[in-house]
Amino acid sequence: MGVLGAGRIGSAMIRALKSCRSDLEVYASGRSEETLAKALRLGAEVSRDNAYVVRKSDLVIVSVKPHNFLDLYNQVPVDFWSGKLVVSVMAGVKLETLSRVLRGAKVFRAMPNINTLVSKSATAIATNDNNSDDRSTVENVLRCFGSVYWVPEEYLDIWTSLVGSGPAFIAEIIDGLVLGAVSSGMTRDVAYRAILDMIEGTVKLLRELDSHPIEVRDEVTTPSGTTIQGLKVLEAKGIKAGLIEVIETSFRRSREIGVEIDSSIKSKINW
């Protein structure tokens, strides 16, 4: 299989693929020597020639920056795409556009996140391909990155803001908790490790008990105790409303970028 664009997310996918299926032949392209050298260290055969990677692969993951997508249109002969399974992880490039540019390919859109590095991504997939074998093949590959969710294409902008950007939001919250512990007298190292364990344990509790977050909150909260005092601050600071706004604002920007990118591509190609 091939990975076009072995940059940050591309190299994460190569790492996950080789960790999951060490015998898998992976071909990767990149623009810089540094990118190619990293992909080579991860076990891929590398090339600057996108056409070569497409020709050698039955399934191709397109991980180039969206504004570089038309380079593929210019660099790869149209007939090279015919019959290929193509999974785009580019934000904003719609299935319709992919199908028109990569003529003859069976196209899918996927949205993994940086947690692919540790095979714990939550990856959304959308397609208009109803062939069960094609869908199964793509799903089996993407399961190397973590969990997989089949969604309508219109969910992908929301997914980008919630799951794609989500690790940054969670990391910011974790940093705030660490600083609070440090301010109260705990060392940063102990606070950081304790918070990671606390979050991991809370997630496991929610999953295994199939609990709603409010149930866990109420279970921990006792009358006139420490938890209710902290919750009062969260309420006063509008943290929950702020988190809602974070996702909504990020979603709007994701959608705007998608419209800009798709319009730009369509304006440069004679349909």
Image (cartoon, rainbow, N blue to C red):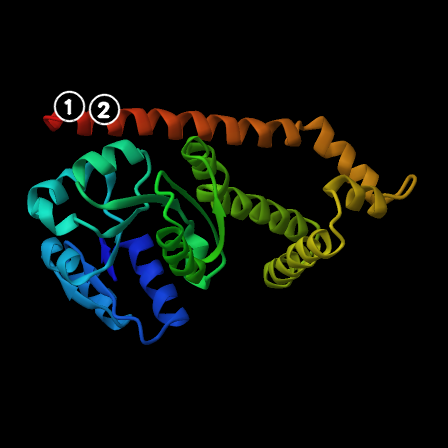
The residue under the point 12% across, 27% down is 268
Residue 155 vs residue 184, the one in the foreground: 155
The residue under the point 61% across, 48% down is 179
Question: What is the quadrant of residue 213 in the picture?
Answer: top right
Amino acid found under the numbered disc labelled 1 = Ser
Q: Which residue is mark 2?
A: 263
- Residue 101 relative to residue 227: left or right: left
Amino acid found under the numbered disc labelled 2 = Ser
Residue 258 locus on image (x, y percent): 32, 29
Residue 15 vs residue 22, the one in the foreground: 22
Residue 96 locus on image (x, y percent): 27, 32
Residue 60 locus on image (x, y percent): 25, 54
Classify mark 2: residues with Cα within 10 Å, few (<14), some (14-19) or many (20+).
Answer: some
Q: How many marks?
A: 2
- Residue 102 relative to residue 245: left or right: left
Q: Which residue is mark 1?
A: 267
The residue under the point 64% across, 63% down is 190
Residue 24 vs residue 189, the one in the foreground: 24
Q: Residue furthest right?
A: 223
- Residue 241 relative to residue 59: left or right: right
Q: Secondary structure at mark 2?
A: helix
Question: What is the quadrant of residue 109 in the picture?
Answer: top left
Q: Secondary structure at mark 1?
A: helix
Instruction: State if disc 1 and disc 2 touch (CB < 8 Å).
Output: yes
Compared to 237, does 193 lie above or below? below
